[in-house]
Image (spheres, rainbow, N blue to C red):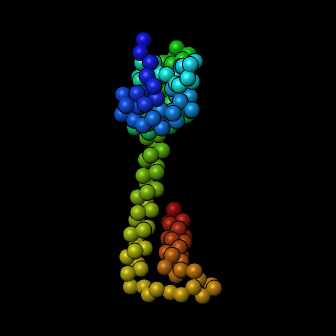
Amino acid sequence: MYLYTVTELANRCATTPHAVRYYTRKGLLRPKRNPENGYRLYRMEEVAWLRFVRQAKSLGYTLKEIKEIMHDVDDDTSPCPRVREILMRRIVENRVHLDELIALQTRMEKAVKQWENMPDGIPDGGSVCHLIESVTSELAQEKIVNSIKH
């Protein structure tokens, strides 16, 4: 059975030795130790795990979630229900986040448009930057109007 060093594993999986060491510290890879020199040595199973970790990360799974998936495998339990549940929850969270980002983008574009004809101001003790403060007061008025409508 061939055992890979950190660098060999990194090269085999198109990642960095730093990433291999990091995933090892996080418990996502489980190397053997060479008793003669203390080097970490990785089996072919770790090649598969490292590729899995990278694929899962590309789908948005956190390292904590990946570790939970690994525990399912260690317990001879199918990780698929957990995998589906996490991704479905993440899709909902992302949609909420996207809505928030779209609203932020809209506010930013409105602010830039509103500021086009406004002069620069000097802080006077009661005001820090009238550009931002003008948007803040406009947002407060919008919230009042929206709460009256609903």
- Above or below residue 121? Residue 58 is above
Name the residue at 51% across, 76% down.
Answer: 132
Vertically, is 21 above or below 148? above
Position of residue 150 relative to residue 129, above or below, is: above
x, y percentage for residue 38?
57, 24
In the displayed image of the protein, which residue is found farthest to the front?
36
Viewer-proximal residue among 134 and 21: 21
Q: Quadrant of residue 103?
A: bottom left
**Residue 59 placement (x, y as % from top left):** 40, 37
The reply, left or right, for residue 53 in relation to residue 26 is left
Q: Is residue 49 visible?
A: no
Residue 130: where, in percent of width, then height? 52, 81
Residue occupying the point 51% across, 71% down: 139
Q: State the residue at coordinates (43%, 22%).
A: 4
Front residue (pair 59, 9): 9
Residue at the (63%, 85%) spot, across then down: 125
Count all numbered tags in the image, as a single digit: 0
Q: Position of residue 18 (x, y in %)?
A: 48, 38
* 51 relative to 130, above or below: above
Left or right of residue 137: residue 111: left
Which quadrant would the N terminus be assigned to in this image? top left
144 or 67, which lies in front? Answer: 67
Residue 43 in sight from this viewpoint: yes
Residue at the top extreme, as displayed:
1
User: Which of 100 and 1 lies nearest the eye of the viewer?
Assistant: 1
